[in-house]
Image: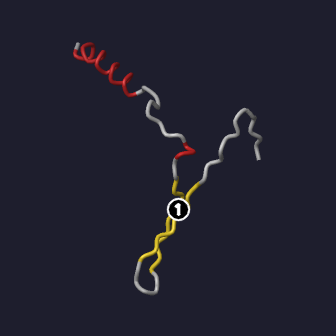
Amino acid sequence: MVIQRLLPFAACAAFLSLTGCWDGEEVNGLAIVTSAGFDRTEDGAVELTLEIAAPKQEESGGKSSGG
């Protein structure tokens, strides 16, 4: 009996959480860090080195070929 009363609320909560990417970011506009390294320099400072993935830019109107 309690389950029958909560079912509509649970269904509404599920539908609201499955709305898709209404505020999504394009992958081309993101900087994705794939690895990071910390080094200490001779003067005692800490140096940060980052490897950032660069997604390929899509060509407009053409098919992409695998490689």
The residue sitting at 22% across, 16% down in the picture is: 2
Q: Is residue 23 left or right of residue 56?
A: left
Q: Is residue 5 left or right of residue 36?
A: left
Q: Is residue 37 shown above or below 66?
A: below
Q: Residue furthest front?
A: 60
Q: Is residue 51 left or right of residue 56?
A: left
Find residue 46 and report its image quarter. Answer: bottom left
Q: Could you say which is closer to the camera, residue 61 or residue 42? A: 61
The residue sitting at 75% across, 35% down in the picture is: 63
Find residue 43 and report its image quarter. Answer: bottom left
Q: Residue furthest left?
A: 2
Residue 59 position within the rendered picture, expressed as x and y whole percent measured from the top left: 70, 39
Residue 55 position within the rendered picture, expressed as x and y whole percent measured from the top left: 61, 49
Q: Could you say which is closer to the camera, residue 65 or residue 15? A: 65
Q: Could you say which is closer to the camera, residue 23 or residue 3? A: 23
Residue 38 position within the rendered picture, expressed as x and y whole percent measured from the top left: 46, 72
In the rendered image, which residue does mark 1 sit on? 35
